Amino acid sequence: MIITGRTDKEHLSNLEEVLKRLKEYGLQANLKKCEFFKDKIVFCGHEIDCNGLHKTQDKIEAVVQAPRPQNITEVRSFTGLINYYRRFLPNLSAVLQPLNQLLEKNRTWRWTEQCENAFLEAKRLITSEQVLMHYDPEMPVKLACDASPYGLGAVLSHTLKDGSERPVAFASQTLNDAEKNYSQIDKEALALVWGVKKFQAYLYGKRFTLVTDHQPLLSIFSPKKGIPAMTAARLQRYALFLASHMYDIEFKPSSLHTNADGLSRLPCTRERQRRVDAVDMFHTAQLEALPVTSTVIKQETRKDVTLSKVYTYTMSGWPATGRKELTPYFQRRNEITTYQGCLMWGMIPQKCQHLVLQQLHEGHVGIVQMKLLARSHFWWPGLDQQIENMAKNCSGCLETLHMPAPVPVHPWEWPAEPWQRINVDYAGPFEKHMFLVIVDAHSKWPEVFCTDSSTSAQTIECLRTTFARFGLPLQLVSDNAQAFVSDEFTRFMSVNGIKHSTSAPYHPATNGLAERFVQTLKQGLRAAKRDEGTLQTKLSKFLASYRNTPHATTNESPAALMFGRPLRTQLDIMKPNRRNEVLNKQAKMLSGGRERHLQTGQEVMVRDYRRGGKWTRGTVHTQTGPRTYQVQVSPDIMWRRHINQMHSRENSTTIEREQAQRDPESDTQGTVEDGGAVKRPQAERRERVDEGAAIADAIMEQAHTEDVQ
């Protein structure tokens, strides 16, 4: 709050009115923070007095307090600063004439009174209202920053409509001892951060442009890009600070960046307050924890041919292109910094690298973990390869290696026919029993034997039974169990001409077909544990279901591939169409026949198969089915016959007469024609009767089945 007045009386009157108003609304003013009867005040960066607004001393202090140049380089920097604003200073060349003469080639350095006067006049001109302007929040703001080996410089400017820049304020600062040891990129970054902090009141909450002559900072501090992952910790911290501001960053070559450069090379003698950098302390502590201390690393860095050059370039700036042996460091030049004579990332001289690697590998943590641990402490070219070599040559690590990554699966060739290759294995013990599993590789047909032991003799016995049923396979695949690698089993394979293949030790996947079925078998038997029946009954039910179920690999049931047909199960009983089809075929076979029935006690002629199918007398005793009867042929003989195998006694006379009158020669006589009619001999009639009997015999089995059902 500023209270003014043109006279003392007016001023006191205005002050009284303000105090009354504060009291009226219950407001109080802190007396210690109030100033009364001042001829001039500083407000919002301006000095205000009876004559109007003036520039404050702190805005031009960096120029006013700039020390006298001590060499040609400093003269060149100072004249560059003045010439940067020459468009606002007419006849500037005449003022700078004594200083420009010092820059002439082969000129002996001699600071004269004329040089001193030119120096003071140039400072007066650049801090005059001809050059400086008041801060305007509506105009674009630009902050140019630069760093020299011993100082920082910054110029806050407004950009005019014609593109020219007019300064608002100057600032410079001498580096402290710790900051002088920063790498060049760290110094340039520090200049940006220091400049923003210096003019925070003008910049915070407003978009402005940062100007630097160090191009690598554009990729680190650009607000349009993320912070590079491998950026040094100090630069990351600077980037996080700048992220709270709205700014663009611009690169300007050093030859055009003379305003900030001149201030950085002629800084005020007041040093920046030394502050302990926590990041630097952390890196130093990490180096001290190594088997070689930071002091040793510092000494060896100076002696190391490569790192000594890297240190020099880091401090003074890298050339446009690096030498071949420095290429790895040149590529990371934006990430390298220095602290207490050591190159950060913790770059270890070659002489100390072996000791550091030994310390790193003490825990035998493996290659990946060693690399992660190393990257958090130190780095040098080829570090990853050296870590790998150390781990690969460590006997302790080699003896405890993990299994390598599995190679692609190489499946067995699918046999062209069933029972060419079989896979065998033992499952169990399960409920105090062992199970010999045999699986056909073509059809997936399984055979399982429940045994009390898994000896070679027992195995051979089960295989012999299986081979008797399906024949000998060409190849048998098994694991290396004792039952399969004994001399007895080897002889059995050799005698039967079977190629015996075994899986690699401790690699059951080679015999995967049998191994997988063992799992399925165990799962099925466990699931049936509470079912009724013996273990063998449960096993039989499991096999019946498995053999008739389509396999996931072949999409066919094992039975269909093994025998060319599915197995008949209880599920087929629920299909009535099959039975009707059979009955229809039977009806066609019997079509045209005459229905006959016999009564109990009826005299019949019965077919006697003891005498070549002749007929014998008998009496119907009992009807046992729709077409079958029990016939009494003698007091102690009872036959069961189909009705087609019997004649009633009414026809017996004709049959006996035909048998008695049979003429052997008539069997060979042909037919004779009589009046256009064909007469068939008796032999042909007998053949027809025999043919009918044969048909009856063919369906008798089906009729017997019906009787049983």
Image (cartoon, rainbow, N blue to C red):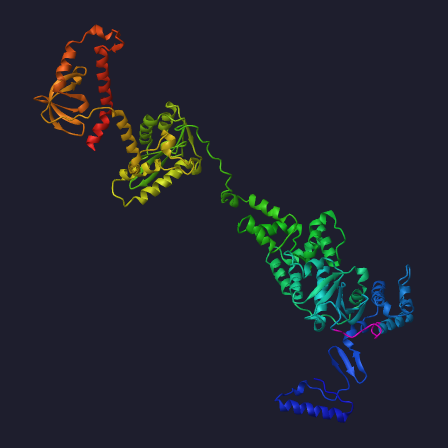
Taking the image as drawn, is residue 416 in sight? Answer: yes
Where residue 10 sits, quadrant-wise, is bottom right
Magenta stretch, residue numbers: 126-136
Q: Is residue 3 left or right of residue 550?
A: right
Look at the picture and state if 12 lies above or below 407: below
How many marks are shown on the rendered structure? 0
Q: Quadrant of the N terminus?
A: bottom right
- Hey, which quadrant is residue 164 in on the image? bottom right
Q: Position of residue 619 (x, y in %)?
A: 10, 23
Does 549 sit above or below residue 685?
A: below
Residue 9 counted in the magenta span: no
Pinpoint residue 581: horizontal percent, then vertical percent: 30, 31
Relative image position of residue 707 (x, y in whole percent): 19, 30
Residue 3, above or below 400 = below
> Is residue 462 left or right of 309 when viewed as pictured?
left
Left or right side of 660 for 243: right
Q: Is residue 194 above or below residue 492?
A: below
Membership of 127 in magenta stretch: yes
Q: Which quarter of the rendering shows the C terminus?
A: top left
Asked whether residue 361 appears in the rendered view, the answer is: no
Residue at the limit of the structure toward the front, as seen here: 675
Residue drawn at (18%, 18%) of the image: 609
Question: 377 or 154, which lies in front?
Answer: 154
Q: Quadrant of residue 627?
A: top left
Nearer to the camera, 208 or 343: 208
Magenta segment, prevailing SS (helix, strand or loop): loop
Q: Is residue 509 left or right of residue 262?
A: left
Q: Nearer the viewer, residue 152 or 289?
A: 152
Q: Position of residue 307 (x, y in %)?
A: 70, 53
